[in-house]
Image (cartoon, rainbow, N blue to C red):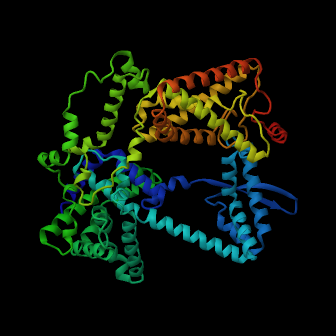
Amino acid sequence: MNRKELKRQGKRGLKGHYLIFVAACLIAAFLGSEFKGSLNFSLLRTYEQIVEDPSKNIQFIVSVPGQAVTWENVLMQIMQTDTQAGREFSEQLKQEAIARAKEGNPMFGRTRGVLSNIVNQVSSGSIIVTAVAAIASVTGSESIGVAILILAGAAVFFLYWFFIQNVFPVVVRRIFLEGLAYHQVTAQRFLFLLRIKKWAKASWMMFVTSVFLFLWSFTIAGAFIKRYSYFLVPYIAAENPDMRACDAITLSRKMMKGHKWECFVFEMTFFGWYILGALTLGIFNIFFTNPYKTAVMTGYYARLREKAIAEGIEGAESLNDKYLYEKPDDAFLREKYADVIEITKQPPDPDGDLTGWRGFIARNFGILLFSRAQEKEYERAEAEHIRIHELIDDMQGLAYPARLYPMPEENRRKFVQSLNYMRHYTVWSLLIIFLSLACFGWVWEVSLHLITNGEFVNRGVLYGPWLPIYGTGSVMILMLLTRLRRRPVLEFSAAIILCGFLEYMTSVMMEWTSGGMKWWDYSGYFLNLHGRICAEGLLVFGIGGIAVVYVIAPLIDNTLKNVNEKVLKMACVILASVFIADLVYAQIHPNAGEGITHVAQTDIKVQSQ
């Protein structure tokens, strides 16, 4: 085949789908599925170890490049001695890490917080000691506990490999195959196998292929030749994951007959790019070589597929995803997407559209100031637009037409459709959402303190069962990030930034207005900034913000639509009046003391030293 032509085609595909192609290969590298060598730059680090000198009775820290304490070290310590020795060993590692964190940047604190505890337990291996001790207490034997833990770890690793690492190459090939003929490939295509309910079947197909390759690896010829015999299985699974594993393997073997040496030589032409990638510790491979080679080899598969169908190779009829390689004609698309076309042809209803300042607020902040007929019609039209939004690109031939796939993709359930996250909220809905989430935040923090410290305290500066920062953050996310809702990753990132800014400035303002009193202090938490915000808090805010936007707020709004409007307004006025009264009273007599996040006296002494 013409390698230069295939490489030109691969470069065009990479240029047109650069971000999604790079993302697919990078995710595969992080999952350990493919391209693992591209992350070598992340392994260049120096580890510090405590070394004892018995003759001088001192300890000192030495740097050991490329070595790190692993869970295997802790397990080995337990097997050589006992659980207590393993516990002492992991505790020593934990204290060393905490000491280094205190001597370094304060933002990397390791003494307080859930995230700090998780980091300490995982990095020191104490989680292994705890698991062994728990199993030993049941079985009565540490050896059995270690054996069970090893078997359980092996089972978890196998399941992860089987359902994630093993099958993700198929997902990557699907992304690249759709990029051959279509201008747009969205992140939703990563869920292709789930949408057609064939993830497990594709996993089994790749598993059988791996078993065959493993068995052939014991032969000199098979270790090399069979890799190219089965080279096309991920592509075949990406096109038709409903095939039997043996049929897919047989088809790959037949399609590669007479092309194995050709494929080997073709792969060798990328050797220079990989040398450049090695010189950049894998970084160049991430941003160019991996997606470039995959795009080229995808085009190579398309040529072999075309040849197999033309020659009538047995089994090639299973490669029946015709519109993966050629765009359907307009007449056929119009037939399959008639409902979408009908909706797009309808002119906008001037009576249903909101103009002026009402339209500006609705479009940019997601707020409907009134609940009149025009606002309701506008909301209905927007919901219908959201329903067909994902199908417009398919209908126009810009993206792969999912309706034309031989196996129908699963439709969204009515409950999911009812959670229209692009909706607009009335002022009354936003007020109830604010108060509901403020109460939830209060219950959350009170419950957490009760479980952790065994005592009930009224968290926050107010006296009522609410923490305004939770409600304020939720409403601000709904209002200020309205235009990002169609992009969950951007919504999540922006929610973290917004909530972090809100919490930091709230801390500054409250400290300033109360004469220097600190209302919370995250010093000692892992990744904190001046003790005002910390990583685990921002992570919770980000996850909570996503939950609010896509689930909680739509559920609350759906519930409120079933409530009589007059009753709703009256309830809002009463609740708002009580909240404002509490707010005014707390300004005069703040709820200071018990509700403030405290720093233990011992931690303060350690930090001062």
Q: Position of residue 410 (x, y in %)?
A: 33, 55
Placement of the C terminus among the 4 image quadrants: top right
Residue drawn where x is 81% and y is 60% of the image: 52
Residue 103 visible to the viewer = no
* The quadrant where residue 156 appears: bottom right
- Residue 414's place in the image compared with 72, above or below, is above
How many numbered discs, if any? 0
Judge from the rendering whether residue 4 lies leftward or rightward of residue 109; answer left or right: left
Q: Could you say where residue 20 lies in the image, as x and y percent from the top left?
A: 36, 47
**Res 544 visible:** yes
> In front: 557, or 62?
557
- Extreme residue toward the top, this view: 356
Looking at the image, the residue that sits furthest to the bottom is 219
Q: Which residue shows up at 42% across the image and 78% down it?
A: 214
Image quadrant of residue 518? top right
Percent x, y of residue 32: 47, 61
Residue at left offset 73%, top offset 21%: 586
The residue nearer to you, when weighing 386 against 73, is: 386
Horizontal relation, residue 301 to residue 528: left or right: left
Could you tell me which quadrant the N terminus lies in? bottom left
Instruction: Determine whether, in the image, residue 446 is placed left or right of residue 605.
Output: left
Rendered position, 18 above or below 85: above
Q: At 28% across and 66% down in the image, what residue appears?
A: 236
Q: Position of residue 383 (x, y in %)?
A: 34, 35
Q: Image quadrant of residue 462? A: top right
